Amino acid sequence: MNTRKNLPIEQKRALRRASLRRAGLYALAISLSLWILLPIWLIATMAFSTPANVRSFPKPFSPNPISTDTMDFFINADGILQATGNSIVAALLTFALSTLIATPASYAIARFLFRGRNAVRLGILAVRAFPIVILAVPLAVTFINLNMYDSVISVALLHTALVLPTSVLVIASVFASVPFELEEAAQVFGCTPFQAFLRVVIPLTLPGIAAAGIFAFVTSWNEVFGAMLLTLTNRTLPAQILFSLSRSSDPFKFAGGFFMLVPSMIFIFFIRRYLFNMWGQITK
């Protein structure tokens, strides 16, 4: 028996509006997913097609036949493997440095009241608004004077400076959502303030720290202007691809685009549960 027919008109309208909102939400989610996934699928199709199919027109929607010739051509190109290693090292260094620096700084901003606290927050946010050239050019001169130019460490330091403002703001907002009474309770039961921070606060804020780390890793992996300015022979992968782009063929470009996507997708896949936990924590 359909009980919906026996409902009042107002409830029927409310149910109809709820169904329309749900359908609209699903349609929006599907549209956004297709907007993101369709270019990835097309790039992957070209990366695993034969060079002849890549050069053909119209382009195939799926690889037929599936071939690794295009990827092999890209990977074996001059400087690609070295640049890939440099990018991985720079991204991991950026991830580690930004996390180690931003975590205590965020805790101080979220927990302690001190003179100029709002000015510090505004200053951190203002740094993020600077164009990268404002940071890259003075740092290039500084690294030349310190004999650190054309090294992966110099690129990682630049990327750390780029991501620190956002990392501090993200982690500080998560620290602020953790009640201070939990730390006080831990200290009542014998923990020192540092032990309470490690055993109580850090586990609760790990999703936010992981989200900031993902942002740092992906930003470092994709950044190209600073890497081009700070390196000549030890280029990162985006800088090497950009350097070779004007004289490269279509198979090289498509394979390079797909190769750039893979590490970020793998990194996010393994750390995704922290993002889901953070989403649940924020929406409580």
Image (cartoon, grey):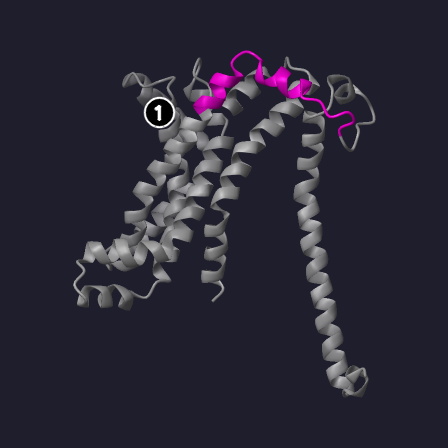
Q: Which residue is at 45% across, 37% downward?
A: 217
* Residue nearer the viewer, 47 or 164: 47
| Image position of 32 with respect to 81: above or below | below
70 relative position to 137: left or right: right
Please provide percent x and percent y for residue 128: 42, 42
State the extent of the magenta-drawn residues as a range: 63-86
| Image position of 70 with respect to 88: above or below | above
17 relative position to 253: left or right: right
Quadrant assignment, res 189: bottom left
Q: Which residue is at 73% across, 70% downward?
A: 19
Q: Is residue 245 visible?
A: no
Please provide percent x and percent y for residue 96: 35, 37
Q: Which residue is at 23% across, 58% downward?
A: 196
Quadrant assignment, res 36: top right
Task: Return the residue found at the far front.
Answer: 1
Whether 96 is among the magenta residues is no
Q: Is residue 283 visible?
A: yes
280 relative position to 39: left or right: left
Whether 80 is among the magenta residues is yes
- The residue singled out by tag 1 in the image is 153
Q: Which residue is at 49% across, 43% downward?
A: 270
Label 1: which secondary element: helix
- Can you say which quadrant of the picture contains the N terminus? bottom right
